[in-house]
């Protein structure tokens, strides 16, 4: 059984650390948005499997929260750029699922994920 990769060293750039810590959250977010857009466009029909989209949402929120805690523990400034993600993640379940607003609220988190990963690169 191979050993897991070593955590980034303290000397690694802050942007690298943030990108590594937030990678699971961004993958879950991208998968959830992709599935949601595929369903909204009619390319995918989930039928009785809507729970997959809901499970991806829970995974997104959980991994984002864990990433935020890791950034807080490291006192990484990327946390400040990630915090606005909380608003769209909190609002999206309250917006009707088949509305344009649901899509717009869900997609509004993307710039904050990107900003958190890019922080520390002179931006």
Image (tube, rainbow, N blue to C red):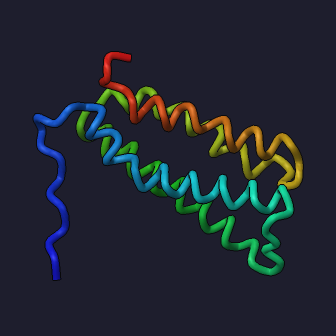
Of the pair 65 and 21, the residue shown nearer to us: 21
Residue 111: quarter of image:
top right
Q: Residue at x 32, y 37 (%)?
A: 72
Q: Residue at x 45, y 49 (%)?
A: 65
Q: Position of residue 81 (x, y in %)?
A: 45, 28
The quarter of the rendered structure image containing the N terminus is: bottom left
Q: Is residue 34 left or right of residue 83?
A: right
Q: Position of residue 74 (x, y in %)?
A: 23, 38
Above-or-below relation of 48 to 86: below
Q: Is residue 118 left or right of residue 33?
A: left
Query: How many numbered circles are shown?
Result: 0
Q: Is residue 33 left or right of residue 41?
A: left
> Residue lying furthest front in this view?
43
Residue 73: quarter of image:
top left
Q: Position of residue 110 (x, y in %)?
A: 58, 38
Q: Position of residue 118 (x, y in %)?
A: 39, 30
Above-or-below relation of 99 to 83: below
Q: Is residue 46 left or right of residue 114?
A: right
Q: Residue at x 33, y 26 (%)?
A: 77
The quarter of the rendered structure image containing the C terminus is: top left
Of the pair 115 and 54, the residue shown nearer to us: 115
Of the pair 59 and 121, the residue shown nearer to us: 121
Q: Residue at x 57, y 52 (%)?
A: 30
């Amino acid at each position: 059984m191979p050993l897991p990769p070593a955590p980034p060293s303290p000397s690694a750039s802050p942007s690298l650390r943030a990108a590594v810590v937030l990678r699971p959250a961004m993958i879950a977010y991208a998968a959830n948005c992709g599935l949601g857009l595929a369903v909204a466009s009619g390319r995918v029909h989930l039928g009785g499997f809507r729970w997959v989209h809901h499970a991806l949402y829970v995974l997104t929120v959980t991994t984002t929260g864990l990433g935020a805690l890791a950034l807080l523990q490291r006192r990484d400034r990327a946390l400040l750029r990630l915090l606005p993600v909380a608003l769209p993640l909190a609002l999206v379940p309250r917006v009707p699922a088949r509305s344009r607003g649901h899509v717009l609220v869900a997609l509004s988190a993307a710039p904050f994920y990107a900003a958190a990963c890019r922080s520390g690169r002179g931006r």
